[in-house]
Image: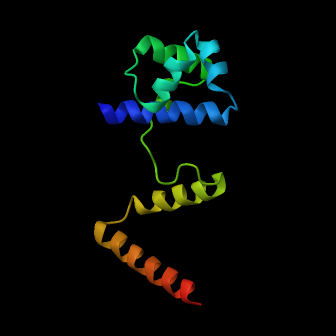
């Protein structure tokens, strides 16, 4: 459960920063203490659903956005993220053997490209 608390806290912080809000601004909007919100963002606080609802409201988002698992493509430019998502969509229909071959080919291409 500790991992989920950290994910939610990190995601709250990321969304808050994307919305260019300070901890103080979000805390005031949610009716929470700034120090409490800081603890939530650090993953030190195991919040209730009621508190989560207040934070969702303050950030003007739905709860689903705060529970998304960490992703290696998160924080990339949106265009790059979209291209990776398109490629991942194509890989969904491939077998494990085909995916391993694609990875091997891509690795060889990258190594050749980096050596030039």
Residue 101 screen position, x and y as percent: 36, 77
Rendered residue at 45%/84% (across/down): 108
Is 94 situated above or below 101? above
Q: Is residue 10 above or below residue 111?
A: above
Residue at (39%, 14%) from the top-left corner?
48
Quadrant (top left, top right, bottom left, bottom right) of the N terminus: top left
In the image, residue 116 sits, relative to residue 20, either above or below, namely below
Residue depicted at x 44% and y 44%: 70
Going 55% across and 12% down the picture, which residue do you hit? Answer: 32
Residue 36 falls left or right of residue 80: left
Single out the residue that lies furthest toward the bottom. 116
> Can residue 67 be seen in this snapshot?
no
78 relative to 71 in the view: left or right: right
Q: Nearer the viewer, residue 5 or 35?
A: 35
Which residue is nearer to you in this view: 59 or 95? 59
Quadrant where the C terminus sits is: bottom right
Q: Position of residue 64 (x, y in %)?
A: 47, 29
Residue in the foreground of this view, choosing between 85 and 13: 13
């Amino acid at each position: 459960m500790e991992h989920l608390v950290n994910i939610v806290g990190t995601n709250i912080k990321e969304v808050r920063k994307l919305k260019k809000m300070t901890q103080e601004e979000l805390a005031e909007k949610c009716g929470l203490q700034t120090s409490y919100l800081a603890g939530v963002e650090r993953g030190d606080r195991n919040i209730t659903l009621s508190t989560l609802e207040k934070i969702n409201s303050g950030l003007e988002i739905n709860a689903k956005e705060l529970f998304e698992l960490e992703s290696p493509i998160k924080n990339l430019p949106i265009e790059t993220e979209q291209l990776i998502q398109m490629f991942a969509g194509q890989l969904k229909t491939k077998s494990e053997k085909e995916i391993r071959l694609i990875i091997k080919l891509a690795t060889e291409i990258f190594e050749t490209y980096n050596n030039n």
